[in-house]
Image: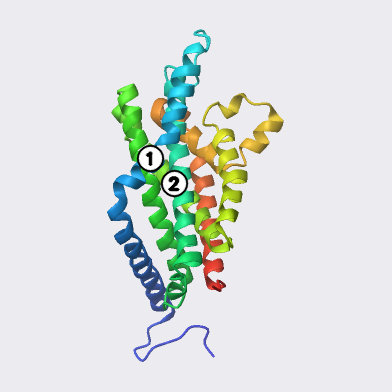
Amino acid sequence: MKSQLINSRGNKTIPNVKNGLLKNIITDTLTVFWGEWLDLRARIAQIAATGLISPLIYIFAFGLGLGNTIDRSITPTAGENYLQFILPGMVALSSMTISFGGTTFSICGDRLFTKTFEELLLLPVHPLALYLGKMLAGIIRGLMTAGSVILVAIIFTGKISSFLNPLFISLLILNCSVFAGLGVIIGLRVKSLESVSLYNNFLIVPMSFLGGTFFDPTNLPSILKVIVYCLPLTYTTSGLRAAAYLPLSSFPWYSIPILCGFAIALSFFGAYQFSHQQD
């Protein structure tokens, strides 16, 4: 028996099946995302402002307050002063917080309160498409808030090209995809809103301060570097900082495949979680 199927005209059908599966996944992903977008578009201003408060506090407290007390002889590794140094980190921080939190609470609300999540699981949709659709909505949430922080950064620095270049935006989207994907997985696994707070306090909050947002990870002792470079946010902050202020020759290109690796791994795990989800 031949290993590949042959249709009546003698053409191989396996590639067609694969192409059809890929097309269905893309179509189903966009369908799931569109359902999320119908809800998001009515709250664009609210979502954009939600994650702006914490970065603004950090900018005023650390960038302007602490930054003005730092020894003037100390030159930051990127940017002209400490305020400029932390601004890319604030963009990464805001995108992480909203991509994760918004996605997690959205899924938890459907699962634990409105009880509409079961209807989604009954749809004849590939599990990967369910994951990707929810993740895309999380990316949009993160980009909305990050856009507000980028606007603040441009006002403070006057450097539009530093924060609106293809490399900077690409890294930002990758960061949103990682933490939106993590938010999907956590949202599927938690049993109560208290559990969400637990993940937020022990995962997101520590990463906010240890992910290189307020310091240069390369200056840390070797033992601490091992810990800090296990966090995906570290690669985002380092990459955004380099994309904003440094020449391409100094850009940490390894950050892109590492973030892609995180996103792909979460996609497989998220699809598996959806395929075995029972609510």
Which is nearer the eye, 56 or 219? 56
Task: Tell me the amino acid under the disc marked 2.
Answer: Ile
Numbered circles on residues, count: 2
Image location (x, y in percent) of residue 28 = 37, 70
Q: Are marks 2 and 1 in contact (CB under 8 Å)?
A: yes
**Around disc 2, counting alpha carbons within 10 Å, would you say few (fewer than 14), some (14 to 19), or many (20 or more)?**
many
Which is nearer the eye, 17 or 164? 164
Task: Tell me the amino acid under the disc marked 1.
Answer: Ala
Q: Which residue is mark 1?
A: 146
The residue most toward the right is 223
Question: Mark 2 falls on what kind of element?
Answer: helix
- 105 is higher (above) or lower (below) than 128: above
Image location (x, y in percent) of residue 50 = 39, 43
- Looking at the rendering, which quadrant does residue 278 occupy? bottom right
Q: Residue at x 51, y 12 (%)?
A: 69
Q: Residue at x 47, y 74 (%)?
A: 118
Q: Residue at x 65, y 32 (%)?
A: 225
- Nearer the camera: disc 2 or disc 1: 2
Can residue 242 be seen in the rendering of this structure? no
- 35 is higher (above) or lower (below) than 166: below
- 60 is higher (above) or lower (below) than 27: above
Image location (x, y in percent) of residue 154 = 32, 28
- 96 is higher (above) or lower (below) than 104: above
Which of marks 1 and 2 precedes in the sequence?
A: 2
Image location (x, y in percent) of residue 184 = 50, 58
Q: Which residue is mark 2?
A: 98
